[in-house]
Image (spheres, rainbow, N blue to C red):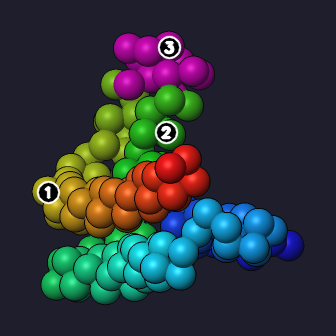
Amino acid sequence: MSVKLSGTLIILLGAVIYGLSTDFVTFTPETIKLLMLLSLLSELGGRILRIYLTKNLPVSRDFSINSTVCHFGGILASDALFGSVLGFLLWELVAGKTLMPHSDTLSQVLLRLIGVAAIRFVCGITMIVVIHLYLFR
């Protein structure tokens, strides 16, 4: 069983382990504070923003993600079983009609989640750039 760590926490942990192994020769305390701030902004800020952006929508985040993934997975499986044209048509006749009434709401939730993921990605890339600048200066 492993601990579930997000990307920014793994980056921070790697920087701290590197700093401890080199006695913080290349890192200053300000660097570690900046990395901790970026990690905190990514983790807590991302969670708060995700909850705020999706709280008043009629479908949950889990339903939006699961139904979209299952829909595409079903299309792929039916294509593999029946061929691309027949499989797509069968899937859309059976399952597509149940997804279509919710497609606008699902797309709103997914677009908002993509925005939050982009913010977390930018924080992670910024952390990597900061580490790179302080290691190779």
The residue where tag 1 is placed is 104
Q: Secondary structure at mark 3?
A: loop
Quarter residue 21 falls in: bottom right
Residue 12 in the image: above or below residue 68: below
**Magenta residues, as a range?**
78-88
Residue 102, image x, y percentages: 21, 60
The residue where tag 2 is placed is 74
What predominant SS class does the magenta segment belong to? helix
Is residue 45 in the magenta section?
Answer: no
Inspect this view and state whether residue 58 appears.
no
Residue type indicated by callout 3: Gly
First reached walking from the N terminus: tag 2 or tag 1:
2
Residue beneath the point at 50% across and 40% down: 73
Residue beneath the point at 49% across and 39% down: 74
Residue 40, image x, y percentages: 43, 82
Residue 62, image x, y percentages: 42, 70
The residue where tag 3 is placed is 83
Residue type indicated by callout 2: Gly
Inspect this view and state whether residue 50 appears.
yes
Q: Secondary structure at mark 2?
A: helix
Q: Badge 2: how crowded within 10 Å, few (<14), some, or many (20+)? A: some
| 133 relative to 51 in the view: left or right | right
Residue beneath the point at 55% across and 31% down: 77
| 70 relative to 99 in the view: left or right | right
